[in-house]
Image (cartoon, rainbow, N blue to C red):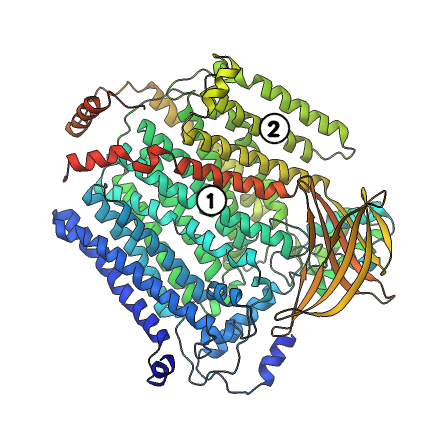
Amino acid sequence: MLEMFSAAGFGFDELGHFALVLAFFVALWQAVVPLVGASRGWYDWMASAVPAAVIQFVLIAFSFAALMRAFILSDFSLILVASNSHTAKPLLYKITGTWGNHEGSMLLWVTILSLFGMLVALFGRNLRPTLKARVLAVQAMIGVAFLAFILFTSNPFLRTAVPPFDGQGLNPLLQDPGLAFHPPFLYLGYVGLSTSFSFAVAALLEGRVDAAWARWVRPWTLMAWMFLTIGIALGSWWAYYELGWGGFWFWDPVENASFMPWLVGTALLHSAIVAEKREVLKSWTILLAILAFSFSLIGTFIVRSGVITSVHAFANDPERGVFILLILAVAIGGSLTLYAARAHVLRPKGTFALVSRESALVVNNVLLIVAAFVVFIGTIWPLVVEMTTGRKLSVGAPFFDMAFTPFMVGIAMLLPIGALLPWKRASLDAALVPLRGVLALALALGGLVWWLQTGSSLLAPIGVALATWVVLGAVDDLLVRAGWPRQPLGQTLRRLGRLPRSDWGRAVAHAGLGVTIFAVSTLLAWQYEDIRVVRVGESYAFGPYRLRLEKVEENVPGPNYSATRGTFTLMDREGRVLATLHPEKRVYPVSGMPTTEAAIDSTLGRDVYVVIGDRQNDGGWAVWAYIKPFAPWLWIGGLLMALGGLLSLSDRRLRVAAGAARKARLVPAE
Amino acid sequence: MTGWRKAGDGPRHRLRTGAVMRWLLLLAVGVLLLAPREAGAVRPDEMLDDPALEARAREISRNLRCLVCRNENIDDSNADLARDLRILVRERLKAGDSDEQVVQYIVDRYGEYVLLKPPVNGATLWLWIAGPVLLVIGLAIAFLHVRRRASAPEPATPLDPEEEARLARLLGEEGGQEG
């Protein structure tokens, strides 16, 4: 059957390509017709957005499936498959190889974009029809731009007349479960922010933002934020165990590209709460929604244009970069112009005092946004300087550590207080009362750590104090919400279970931030490192442990690599065996590239991280061994944040947006 | 790189379309970028016997860029150039240079591009002060805005008809809703 199609010169690849072209035209329809309908009040024109969004998704998903099929079957008549896949690759990496390259990852990008469009179309039954039509139209405009980008500059379905016998393989570093699933999560996150953007632009077109609008935007933002959090944590985890020395964050432009939308998305999440509950900060929330997705687009530009690789590579082959830059200019410029023109019609309703939860959230927003801009400036600074003056500069981790960290410290210091302040008008003294104990404990713990550690670095004491403050502050937040200290503790505890999920979500996410702060600061401050040449059979003291190199096997075959495999025994000082570790050094013959697979023994208190290197002249082996205190808490912190998002998302009030439903039925048209 | 030799040794005209060269280039760039990101970093034979000196060398290395890598310091990089620089740093330290002198020595030979933390001077001043300046501006705007909102009278505007209807409905159904 398949052969017949191929023989006729008509296969799934062509169908996939064709579906993509069709999707482009459907998106074009969806971008124009509902918009005209909304401004004229023509209901069937508006309504056509829903089937269009569904069809658009089905077509793009089909196209994506066709590309995945080509990867799975190693259809080397596609240039993309030939240059990025290989028959000897395990099936999992053939599948994930679909997005392990520029073209495929862009196709994944629009697949997710259209998925969100479809979800809004299907779950937005209660939305005001004009708003819904406009949201879907804006979503489709983004789709049109990126489908055009794919079709004209990054087409994954290009054929070659003479297919090679085998492909050139996927970068071995990408052949790893952590990285294989990192891009889909990341894209669900930062492409998901497109929905908030579409809602914002639609609200500006419509000229009104009410509590119902904010109530709609919040779950979409929350969902995107949650995926983005998981995506970033996955990427960081991958770097930690795969790159070989246990670094977990490098301030690499590619990382920053996903971190900036996360920071702004976090700000948006918080200001959307104010817009929903208090109907103030509405125009600010709109601006943040625009900014958050703008940073997603900037991130896409940074990663996909090749501009970070080198300004010269970009200048020599600017087609893609210029195309995305054009999309950027139209999307950001257009939406900001619209914002400038229409923002004044969004009148705030409530008022609030200088000391209030509203103000605390404003400060939270300022800190997050400025932090995002610092990351942004640091990321593009070398490009700007080189393009304008020709000077080559580096802006690396030491800069970001210094320039960014103070903002996180500020946020962590203010967070527990802000979370306890009541809406509208608050008394700082009253809010601080339940936090006194926490503050004392945090300072005491910080002091204890400072006293215990011999080094002079303040990193760990400050980190521990802040983490205690944030985590116990979150616990306090729950207790206060449940009635403490006005009610006895026993009764408070019983009431904890009945608190709304969004309260739990907030506390869990905030605690997650505290846990992350704890893990980052203790890991960086207290890492123990041992680098030496070890002979087979030799054992040596390694911090509170002993390590023995039992044997080294060479040329151990893997599915598409061969490995040098060491066997280490990790013992305590008395010689009791704690773990057996197998670090590997792999060579992938297809690419000729070596990778290291660290062996990690993980407990909640620490990771023991062992890497084996080359054989030395004297017959020993180079061995890097690290003790990384509390390393697993890094990922636990990230997961807690995402879990907090999930809890909030599952809150009844967000799930049904009940108010919006009634409103829509009561007032069908403008 | 061996991978490339291999690809070229096979049948020469596998892919003939015009785009092929660009594809290969892109792939080559990709591989080159990722290739140095392999474990290794400081090797045992490079390390100094004096732990204090070695610690200083490590600290200096963390702020120096591996020039042929993407955003990697010489302490983490496995590239040959990074190794050369690591050895150079240690030689200077052994010769009695201060940390600043070592860094200056490297900068004199490789340019300021080698510094991962750009120096605070003319052109980079904005980079350094951008954060604090933006923070002050942001907080000032926020403060003014909040104070205006705080002093503004509670809006006396009655509910619009839509809200009236909703309120009536809510009161009728549930007897109110939590704000």
Please identify the quarter of the rendering in which residue A277 is found: top left
| Spot occupied by residue A645 in the image (x, y as percentages of width and height) | 44, 38
Q: Is label 2 in a helix, a strand or a loop?
A: helix
Q: Is residue A251 visible?
A: no
Q: Residue at x 52, y 75 (%)?
A: B24
Same-chain check, marks 1 and 2: yes
In the shown orientation, is residue A37 left or right of residue A321?
Answer: left
| Spot occupied by residue B86 in the image (x, y as percentages of width and height) | 76, 57
Alpha carbons under labels 1 and 2: distance apart: 24 Å
Q: Is label 1 in a helix, a strand or a loop?
A: helix
Mark 1 Cα within 10 Å, few/some/many (few <14, many 20+)?
many
Q: Is residue A26 visible?
A: yes
What residue is shown with label 2?
A468
In the shown orientation, is residue A342 left or right of residue A234?
Answer: left
The three-letter amino acid code for the residue at tag 2 is: Thr
What residue is shown with label 1?
A262
